[in-house]
Image (cartoon, grey):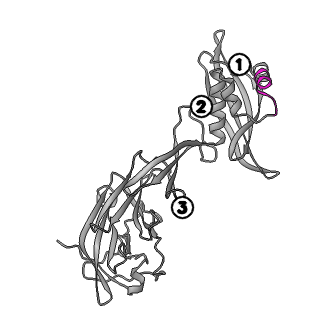
Amino acid sequence: MRTSLLVSMTLLGLLSAPLSPQGTQAQGTQGAGQSQQAQGIANPQRRDTAARLANPVQTKQDLILINTFAGDGTFKAARKYADRHDGSPAEFRVYDLKITQGRGELGEERMRVLTQDDYCLAIEFRDVHGDAFPELIFYTTSQDRQHNNMYIVRYDRSNTNFQGMNPDVPFATLQARYAFKPKTAAIPAEIIVDSVITSPEVIFAAPNPIGGQLPQFWLRQVYRVHELGFKLYENAPLETPYYALSSMLSALSARDFFAAYKYAFTDAAYEVYRRDVQNLHPLLCGKRTGSRFLLNEWGLDLQRDDQIQGWMNFTHIFQDEGRERQIFYQAFMRKIYEEWKITSIRKLRES
């Protein structure tokens, strides 16, 4: 049966203006055959536009966005269809849009985007390929708003159908931030995904949050956009203070002084650095029985003399001659050329 949702608008607004229906569960949903007023008229030449829910978890809300994909005067409507408010995973649907006397009606269903995510977050039209025609992007989020996902659909103008575009390596989704780099003469368009990850180099026991925040590891995934999908081009951890300190201590525990030297900012040559570290902190250099690290306090992104700096206090706990020893350290670090480097580590006390 044809889905029916009437919307009142001007033809000018149809080209890119997002509709903001007032028919929410809390506000009283309008039935089929009733009209809803488009909120604002957008520039018809602007192909990139988005509609986003501020808090999709709190209340059930409608979400619909309209645009043309073929440049032939026909329009499609992308709509949030269901989510956890309806007792099902997040789902989007795409419809033909029929225009009659300035009024639009959802016609034939053209595609469903089924997910295992909790809530629909946003719909966006963006020219991903750089061919002057937009792709359709759907965003979802989890109940705790920590996991975000993205789904991209292209319109095949030759076959007049919609096709999902998939990455060859899945997007990381934990607190993911998505960005686009437009196509140039030299390289295709890129999708950049920055996401929190767990790292095999985490050597600290679960740190206590400071001000409700935990130190994090970030992964950057860069995908090159091709006609039918995305190919992973770059996959690398982003340098953070927590990453730099964990990597250095992990290297010292493995007696890999060269790897530890990579995360240090010092004027000393490698051999001098190695000798000084062994002399000053011999108990950090090599795995100890029952060794574990606790992160106690930290302060980051401090602006001093236009330099981004920070500090971390941590405890090294290990067994020595039948007793537990605890040594308290403080590490100072600075962001140098977009990378975090350890400038010094000092021993505070021992118990």
Q: Residue at label 3?
A: 185
The mark nearer the N terminus, 2 or 3, is 3
Mark 3 vs mark 1, CA separation in Å: 54 Å
Q: Residue at label 1?
A: 283
Mark 2 vs mark 1, CA separation in Å: 16 Å
Q: Is residue 270 magenta?
A: yes
Q: Residue at label 2?
A: 204
Mark 2–mark 1 contact, CB under 8 Å? Answer: no
Nearer to the camera, 27 or 164: 164
Image location (x, y in percent) of residue 315: 67, 28
Image location (x, y in percent) of residue 220: 54, 47
Nearer to the camera, 315 or 138: 138
Residue sticking out furthest to the front: 185
Q: In front of the other: label 2 or label 3?
A: 3
Side of 187 where 69 appears, left or right: left
Nearer to the camera, 260 or 299: 260
Mark 3–mark 1 contact, CB under 8 Å? Answer: no
**Local crowd at mark 3 within 10 Å, few (<14), some, or many (≥20)?**
few
Residue sticking out furthest to the left: 1
